[in-house]
Image (cartoon, rainbow, N blue to C red):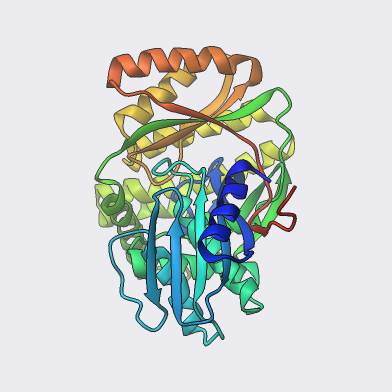
Amino acid sequence: MSDKARAIFTIFQQKFLKDPLLIRAPGRINLIGEHTDYNEGFVLPAAIDRSIYFAMTPSRTDKCNVYSADLEEGVSFSITDLNPGETWVNYLMGVMDAFQRKGLPIHGVDCVFGGDIPAGAGLSSSAALCNGFGFGLNQIFDCKLDRLQLAKISQYAEQEFVGLMCGIMDQYASLFGVKDSVLLLDCRALKHEVIPVHLKDYSILLIDTKVKHNLASSAYNERQHACEQGVQVIHEKNTNVQSLRDVTRTMLYEFQDELGEDVFVKCLYVVEEIARTQRAAVHLKKNELVKFGELMYETHWGLSQAYEVSCDELDFLVSLAKGEKGKIAGARMMGGGFGGCTINLIQKDAVKAFQEKVLDQYIATFHIAPEFYLVKLVDGVAEMIDKNA
């Protein structure tokens, strides 16, 4: 058990004077397939060894008493009075609301949580928060929900209580992750193929820009709306088209004038990214990491120039990576955009020198220090059985 998990367990014992169920809910990365999940495309995510830990028991009342160890603040709310507010508690209320809407026999809980997923880095701390809490409710009250049902509950919480029109990739990857593997997730069928990842001489290095521009939430919803507009126009003459998953490049060009420049360019990026993700999965199965990495670079500049969700800081880091000839197979921005992390497929013996180079040049340019996270691929949300291990 990690020091963080043990600390959460201990804090719970001190606050509630009983032994809890202990749950690990990991964050996630996405190797390729960005902004394709809400277009019913393909993505290639994985759970990582950065997690939120939950210690939970029934409260024996309708009250939920929840303490955030990282923020050192507690909140109590009734499960019969779930009113959205402005803080992290919205996510938990959203999960609780979803359970109630299903008519499941749940009551209040006592809960302490905390973790080591850096906030604002695009590693889906919000999905881990919802998943861990939902998994705990499912275990404690024996609701017998499967992992896909739990992923949908977490997505509901983010959409209905937080107001972010997210796809299901983040929640799905955190729940279904497999050690040393990625998931080729079909976001239409909600089924996945497990692809083992043999990194050999490579590591996965995340570089956190330490910025999150204000455009992030509104721009995400705007991009989703542009995709929906494109589908609506094409659907009027091609009724089989239900999402951009059904659209080909040729078809899209036929409607270029009707769509208008902005919608056309946004839709073209998504159509190309769906195809690119499928090609990338083939390369990964063949352990062709250099060819896989080339597609990562393609994705980044598509996100930057066509989908327009990057920022100067992200573009700067990817350009630095591209300049490391033969050392970094691929790099791109990851997540919704306008800040957060780049993901780099880098040779192990090049990590230290590249970190030093980035640190020097990034601070000189942006006057802020980035952070670096070497991550490993792990199993998805799970109960931690041995509290003393």
Q: Which one is nearer the viewer's eye here, 248 or 295?
A: 295
Q: Is residue 382 visible?
A: yes
Above or below residue 166? Residue 235 is below
Image position, residue 301 (x, y; %): 40, 32
Image position, residue 238 (x, y; %): 42, 68
Residue positioned 49% across, 58% down in the render? 129
Snapshot quadrant of residue 203: top right
203 relative position to 90: left or right: right
Number of numbered labels in the structure image: 0
Q: Is residue 245 visible?
A: no
Residue positioned 42% across, 40% down in the render? 121
Q: Which one is nearer the viewer's eye here, 254 or 340?
A: 340
Q: Which one is nearer the viewer's eye here, 367 or 182?
A: 367
Above or below residue 144? Residue 1 is above
153 relative position to 78: left or right: right
Image position, residue 116 (x, y; %): 52, 43
Above or below residue 240? Residue 101 is below
Snapshot quadrant of residue 94: bottom left
Image position, residue 180 (x, y; %): 71, 41
Residue positioned 71% across, 51% down in the render? 194
Residue positioned 56% across, 40% down in the render? 31
